[in-house]
Image (cartoon, rainbow, N blue to C red):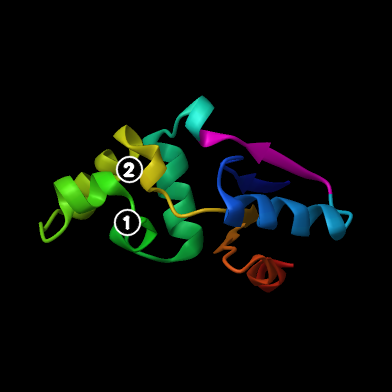
Amino acid sequence: MLQIYHNPKCRKSRAGLDYLKTKGLDFEVIEYLKTGLTKEMLQQILQRLNIKPVELVRTQEDYFKQQLKGKNFSDEEWIQIIIENPKLLKRPVIIHDFKAVWADPAEEADKIF
C-alpha cells in the first residue's frame, strides 16, 4: 500500500499529497504530527530511503537551529530526536512497497512507481 507521511500545514507536503491525487492512486495518509512516530516507523522510512537519520532532518526548523546545529549525534540519538520532535522530519515522505522517496519537489514521487 502506498503511504504518505504528511503535515497538512506544510506547503511542500500538501503539494506531494495533491500530486498523488492527480495520479489517481490509492494511498494512506499518515499525519505523523497527530499520530506520532515510532522507532520502527522511522527505521522503516530510513531503510527504504537508504539514508542516515541526520539526512532526514529539516535544518531550517527553529528547534534545530537553537538546540542541535553544530552538534554530533549517533544515528540512534538522531532517531530519538526525530521521534521526540517530529516537526524535524523532512516531508512529504512517500512509501511504496520497499521503496521510499522524499517528495520535494512532488514529482520525485515518480521514482518509486
| Residue at the far right in the pictured view | 24
Find disc 1 in the rendering and name its residue.
Answer: 53
Q: What stretch is highlighted in magenta?
A: 26-32
Badges 2 and 1: C-beta atoms under 8 Å apart? yes
Instruction: Give yes or no for residue 25 being in the magenta stretch.
Output: no
Whole-angstrom CA distance, mark 2 to mark 1, is 8 Å
User: Sequence-wise, which precedes: disc 2 or disc 1?
Assistant: 1
Is 105 displayed left or right of 90 in the figure? right
Q: Which residue is drawn at 41% across and 33% down?
A: 38
Residue 23 % position (x, y): 85, 60
Q: What residue type is labelled 2?
A: Ile
Secondary structure category for the residue under label 2: helix
- Can you see residue 63? yes
Q: In the picture shown, does residue 85 fall above or below 17?
A: above
Q: Which amino acid does label 1 sit on?
A: Pro
Find disc 2 in the rendering and name its residue.
Answer: 82
Residue 62 % position (x, y): 28, 47
Viewer-proximal residue among 47 and 106: 106
